[in-house]
C-alpha cells in the first residue's frame, strides 16, 4: 500500500492523473504489458501489474489484491494477449504489501504458479503467518505511536479495530511462503530478457525493483511513484531507520542510467531521474519543516505531525482519517529520526515518549 491522497476532485492536471486506472491491457515496451487491477479502498484505485511474454506463457511483476474484480480484470487483461491465469508461469513480487502480493498466493494455490519475493520480506511475512496483524502492543506501529506521544490516536485505531472485529469486517490477508526468496543482484531470465533484482529497502525492508538494463526499463514497484510519495516502513517488524534506508535506495537507483519508469501505481514515465530528484527535494523540505517545527517548540513526534501540512494538497492533520493520521505520524517519526542521525536534533525518552530539541 502506498501513501494515500484521497481527494479525487478533478483539476486539469488530474485528467491525466487518473487515466492510468482505466481497465485494459497496455503495451509499454515490446512484449511488456501493463494491466491495472482494482483495489478495495478509496485511497488508491488501482495497482499496475506487468505481464512479460515468456514463450507461450507469461511472467507477472506483482499480482494485485485478491478480489473478484481484480481476478476478472487480470483474466481479461491476459486474454488480450492470448494468455490466461494458467499460463502465468511465475510472479515476481516487488514487496509484501497486500495490493502487490496477495493474488500471487491464490495463483500459487490454484495453478502452482511459482512465486518469488525479496528475502528482506522474510521476517515480516513470517510474523504475519505467525499471528496476523493487529494493533497489539508488540506491533511496531503501536510502539512507534507510543514513542510519538500519540496514545489517543492509538486508542482510536484500536477502537475502530475492535468494532470491525465485532462486526466481522476484519479480513485478514492471504499469505503463504514464496517458492523462492530473491537476493540482491540476482539476475532472472524471463523470455530472453534479463532482469536484475535490486534491493531497495525503505517502503518495506524487502522491497526490490527489477531492472532490464538492455531495454532501459525499471519495474519500480512502490519505490518510485509518479504522483505520490511512498509510505516508509509500514510493516510488521521494526526497522531502525526506514527513511535513511529509503534515501540510500533512491540514491542507488539515481546512480543507474536513466530508465523508463514502470510504477505500480500511476502512469508509465520516460525517466526515473526526474522523479527521484523530486522525491529527494520533497524529503529535504520535509526534513527542514520538521526541524523548524521542533525549533518552534513542538517537542513530540505527534506534536510535529500536527503542526505540518499533509498530502500534496496541504491538508490539516486533523482533517485526515485515522489511518492516514497514523501514516503521517509514522512519516514524521522517520524524518525526526534522520534529523537525529544527522545531529540536527537531540532526543530524550521520558516515560516511553520521545522529546526532541534543536
Ligand atoms: Zn506498498
Image (tube, helix red, strand yellow):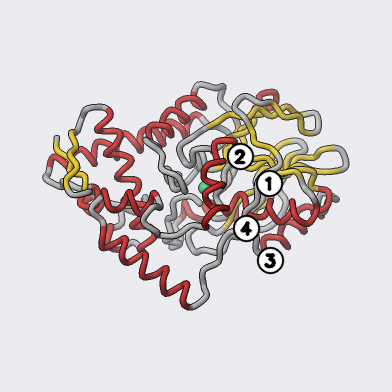
Q: Are marks 3 and 1 in contact (CB under 8 Å)?
A: no
| Image quarter (top left, top right, bottom left or bottom right) of the C terminus | top left
Q: Nearer the viewer, mark 1 or mark 4?
A: 4
Q: Find residue 56 and report its horizontal and vertical position in percent.
A: 88, 42
In this image, 248 relative to 189: left or right? left
Q: Are marks 2 and 1 in contact (CB under 8 Å)?
A: yes
Classify mark 2: residues with Cα within 10 Å, few (<14), some (14-19) or many (20+).
many
Q: Nearer the viewer, mark 2 or mark 4?
A: 4
**How many angstroms separate mark 2 from mark 1 (CA)?**
9 Å
Mark 1 or mark 4: name the one nearer the start of the chain. Answer: 1
Q: Which residue is mark 2?
A: 262
Q: Quadrant of residue 182?
A: top right
Residue displayed at 32% across by 67% down: 156
Mark 2 or mark 1: name the one nearer the start of the chain. Answer: 1
Which of 227 and 198 lies nearest the eye of the viewer?
198
Mark 3 or mark 1: name the one nearer the start of the chain. Answer: 1
Q: Find residue 151 and report its horizontal and vertical position in percent.
A: 26, 59
Amino acid at each position: 500500500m502506498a501513501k494515500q491522497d484521497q481527494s479525487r476532485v478533478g483539476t486539469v492536471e488530474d485528467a491525466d492523473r487518473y487515466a492510468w486506472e482505466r481497465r485494459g491491457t497496455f503495451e509499454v515496451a515490446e512484449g511488456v504489458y501493463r494491466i491495472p487491477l482494482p483495489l478495495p479502498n478509496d485511497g488508491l484505485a488501482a495497482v499496475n501489474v506487468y505481464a512479460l511474454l515468456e514463450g507461450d506463457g507469461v511472467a507477472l511483476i506483482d499480482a494485485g489484491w485478491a478480489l473478484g474484480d481484480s481476478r476478472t480484470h487480470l483474466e481479461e487483461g491476459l486474454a488480450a494477449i492470448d494468455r490466461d491465469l494458467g499460463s502465468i508461469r511465475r510472479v515476481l513480487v516487488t514487496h509484501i504489501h497486500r495490493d502487490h502480493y496477495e493474488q500471487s498466493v491464490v495463483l500459487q494455490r490454484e495453478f502452482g504458479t511459482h512465486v518469488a519475493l525479496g528475502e528482506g520480506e522474510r521476517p515480516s511475512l513470517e510474523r504475519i503467518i505467525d499471528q496476523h496483524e493487529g494493533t497489539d502492543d508488540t506491533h511496531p506501529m503501536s510502539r512507534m505511536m507510543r514513542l510519538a506521544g500519540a496514545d489517543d490516536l492509538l486508542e482510536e485505531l484500536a477502537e475502530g479495530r475492535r468494532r470491525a472485529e465485532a462486526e466481522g469486517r476484519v479480513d485478514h490477508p492471504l499469505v503463504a511462503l514464496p517458492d523462492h526468496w530473491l537476493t540482491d543482484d540476482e539476475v532472472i531470465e524471463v523470455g530472453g530478457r534479463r532482469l536484475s533484482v535490486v534491493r531497495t529497502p525503505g517502503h518495506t525492508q524487502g522491497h526490490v525493483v527489477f531492472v532490464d538494463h538492455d531495454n532501459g526499463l525499471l519495474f519500480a514497484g512502490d519505490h518510485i511513484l509518479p504522483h505520490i510519495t511512498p509510505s516508509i516502513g509500514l510493516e510488521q517488524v521494526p526497522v531502525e531507520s526506514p527513511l535513511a534506508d529509503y534515501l540510500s535506495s533512491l540514491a542507488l537507483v539515481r546512480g543507474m542510467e536513466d530508465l523508463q519508469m514502470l510504477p505500480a501505481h500511476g502512469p508509465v514515465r520516460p525517466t526515473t531521474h526526474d522523479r527521484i530528484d523530486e522525491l529527494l527535494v520533497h524529503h529535504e523540505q520535509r526534513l527542514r519543516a520538521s526541524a523548524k517545527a521542533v525549533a518552534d517548540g513542538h517537542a513530540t513526534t505527534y506534536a510535529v505531525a500536527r503542526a505540518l501540512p499533509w498530502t500534496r494538497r496541504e491538508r490539516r492533520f486533523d482533517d485526515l482519517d485515522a489511518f492516514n493520521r497514523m501514516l503521517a505520524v509514522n512519516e514524521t517519526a522517520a524524518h525526526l529520526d534522520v534529523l537525529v542521525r544527522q545531529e540536527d536534533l537531540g532526543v530524550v525518552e521520558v516515560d516511553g515518549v520521545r522529546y526532541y530539541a534543536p
